[in-house]
Amino acid sequence: MTDIPLCVDLDGTLLKTDTLVEGFLACLKKKPLSLVQAPFWLFKGKAVLKRKIFETIELNPHVLPYHLDFLDYLHGEYEKGRKLILATAAHERIATSIAQHLNIFSEVFSTNHTNLKGSSKCEILEKRFGKKKFGYAGNAHIDLLVWKEAGEGIVVNASPRLLQKAEKMTSVVKFFPQKRGTFLKILKAMRLYQWVKNLLVFIPLILAHRVTEISLFQDAVVAFFSFGLCASSVYLLNDLLDLEADRLHPRKRLRPFASGELSPWIGIFFIPLLLITSFLTALTLSIWFVVTLGIYYVLTLSYSLYLKRIPLIDVVLLAMLYTLRLIAGIASVHVPISPWLFAFALFFFLSLALVKRSSELTMMQKENLESSLGRGYRPDDLELLTMMGISSGFLSVLVLALYIHSEDVSVLYAQPMFLWLICPFFLYWIGRIWFLTRRGGIPDDPILFAAKDKISYVIGSFIFFILYVAS
């Protein structure tokens, strides 16, 4: 029945996302006060909520995640001369913007004063084209009301169960099944690979030579998972608030939320779930660990929402977040640690934070970008960041040398002279990391790079062997 016009839903059908949720998240990022205002807007009606949101922000139709298979099908129908209509509950501003971008729709029906969903959409389409005189492509149970009056149906991004229900309402001529693997995509969005950074909570236990004490080791494991869950909740929030910037990034555009593989609703559900679980887990440890975790969350949230866009403050804060993991390890197992460790950690992790930014700027230079996406740096900042990073890294080795020379060492180590052998290994590793960074060999995060780097494992093994011999 290609002679009848085809009406196409937007959210979840043509797009792999929800424009209302994305609009609200963009609005929240631009004007945090909107979190308080939104319930009052919603009280006046969903149409008012959508209007207020899209009066504040604009979504970029060029980077939104489209269902490409379905879009290819629509282009094919358009080339055959079929009339295509965009019929959506999305606000008219974003609906019109997408229609103009795709340039295949002859008409647009969308939300203005009335929320065009379910029975409202069915009524306007039936009035415009007549009963059974139009086709309809949708993805949700509420679309059953429209399929009931449609001459034919196309089911997109839906379960077989919804397909069966749609087939009872109309003649389904095309089915684009829902992709499976949601659980694995959630794990990917949680960035479990980033949890390797939380191994830092074990460092105080190792340096105190008490890693063989089962109860303390168990506490460190609990701290590891508590930090991981807390960090993952922030990663999800960060991804939801940075959707447009991520979609413009060569690698980040493949993230589950940016690519549309995961609905933003899933992120909104899991963010509080992970955070609450993290703090409930933390309560099994000391109150100081809970306080440290709370500080870490506030700083990480501040970084994600705002501070990561301020040059130099962002890298100092990243170094502090790494150091907080060490403090959390101390708080979880109650072992005394020399203040030298904090001095070493601050300089060492500042160097690694600068590696992270320098690698991004190196990539920008290769791709001839003029400004960093979502950051406050330009390519010509690279030389300065490199000097700061190398200096900070070598200062950390100087602090290590001063610690080895201090009286604190003799308390823990029987043969402290062997510890001097650690310094050249650290000097080589830091120099190599910066050497690779300037050559574009560090893709993003140096700690994640080290977790996959064979030479880093060899150096780490030598350092642990030296610590063993010295003890």
Image (cartoon, rainbow, N blue to C red):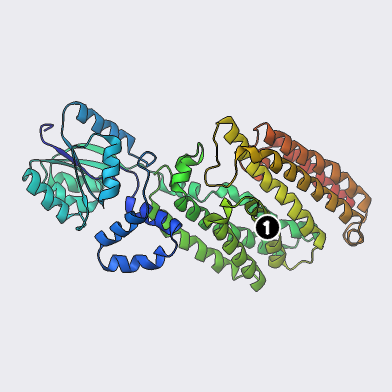
Which residue is more in the foreground, 4 or 247?
Answer: 247
Q: Can residue 471 be seen in the rendering of this structure? A: no
Which residue is the site of mark 1? 320
Q: Amino acid at mark 1?
A: Met
Query: Left or right: where does residue 416 sit relative to residue 315?
Result: right
Based on the displayed image, in which of its 4 quarters is residue 346 positioned?
bottom right
* Residue at 31% from the left image edge and 34% from the top image edge: 69
Mark 1, Cα crowd under 10 Å, few <14 / some 14-19 / many 20+, is: many
Residue furthest to the top: 80
Q: Can residue 99 be seen in the rendering of this structure? A: yes
Query: Left or right: where does residue 456 sit relative to residue 196?
Result: right
Residue 231 image offset from top left, x and y in percent: 56, 56
Which residue is more in the foreground, 66 or 169?
Answer: 66
Query: Left or right: where does residue 364 sit relative to residue 76?
Result: right
Residue 120 image offset from top left, x and y in percent: 15, 55
Quarter the C terminus occupies? bottom right
Residue 144 image offset from top left, x and y in percent: 17, 50
* 437 up-or-down from 146: above or below: above
Based on the displayed image, in which of its 4 quarters is residue 227 positioned?
bottom right
